[in-house]
Amino acid sequence: MTIAPEDHYEVVIVGGGPAGLQAALLLARQLRRVLVLDGNRPRHSATMEAHGFLSRDNIPPNELRAAGRESVEAYENAEIQFAQVTRISRDGEGFRVEAKGVRGSRARLVHGERVILATGLKEIFPELPTLRAYYGTHIHSCVVCDAWNKRDASIAVFGVPSAKTLAYRAAQLSRIGSHVTLFANEEQVHEVDAERLRLLGVAVDRRDIEDVVGERATMTGVRTVDGDVVPVEAAFVLPAFEAQIGFLDDDLRPDLDAEGLIVADNFGRTRVQNLYATGELTAPGPEVLIISAGKGARTAIAAHRDAIGF
């Protein structure tokens, strides 16, 4: 199917979070014709407030995204549509982008001279039956973002089997909570580090977790596999993460590092010409929102400069 001239864009951005919207804003201000395709499935959809974003501290994430869309759509050369990208393939020197509509929007077939991937990451949590019921209210994944709100609470720390930074998280939280219990086996946290944590007042529990428990929508504890319940009021979980790039044709797949993140230079350029990745998709992965937005800005500047050719 031939793509209509009005469906040709200089840059197509996949993802409408802070990184994607910030990239779109700067590109629009450089008079680039920009399209943002947003599947509207943000990773932090269960989170009640976003923290640490200058001038927007404590704002609900959906309001932050809405404000970002409003800023971008103020430019007549920028367009945002709720649509789930299903395939990106080669189209001459550019890209053919196919997307199905969401929330009643129409399907799209467009050409992009350049594509910026800003889809974020999918969280893969420990298999605990009740975890999702408390995620975003009593259980969080970002210590920097949400620890302040749990000051003086009794806090649990745990993660997926492959979690590598649990000791660091527990140490961070030792100065925030009234008491911190780290649930980790010796592969996750070696005994040398466990002893250092104990000196900070952190309890190190080597037992596996069966589930989190609570009453009337309030988390009250962590139940271990032997049936014991450790009382806590909040928890921080370290999930695994997965890049959402299954829509790329095989010949467009960028390299991934050992953590499953897209390999790109400091400006988001991947090994695939004119294909960029920004935000949480690139190392070091999940970060506070304002850093993701900053990475989006940097990638936009790189894409604009590459298009100029100097």
Image: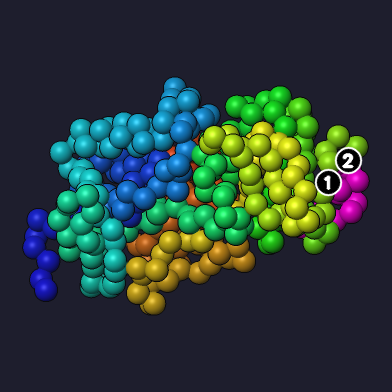
Within-10-Å neighbours for mark 1: few <14, some 14–19, many 20+: many
Relative to 101, residue 170 above or below: above
Callouts 2 and 1 close, C-beta under 8 Å: yes
Q: Is residue 176 visible?
A: no
Could you tell me which residue is drawn at 41 percent across and 64 percent down? 245
Foreground residue among 303 and 179: 179
Q: Position of residue 26 (x, y in %)?
A: 32, 39
User: What segment carries the magenta color?
Assistant: 188-198
Give the number of the mark in front: 2 or 1: 1
Could you tell me which residue is drawn at 48 percent across and 61 percent down? 243
240 left or right, relative to 303? right
Q: Amino acid at mark 1?
A: Val
Relative to 35, residue 97 above or below: below
Foreground residue among 224 and 280: 224
Could you tell me which residue is drawn at 48 percent across and 55 percent down? 121
Q: Amino acid at mark 2?
A: Arg
Relative to 176, residue 230 above or below: below
- Which disc is residue 164 wearing? none
Residue underneath mark 1? 204
Residue underneath mark 2? 198
Which SS class for mark 1?
A: strand
Say which quarter of the image contains residue 68.
Answer: top left
Q: Position of residue 20 (x, y in %)?
A: 36, 46
Say which quarter of the image contains residue 1.
Answer: bottom left
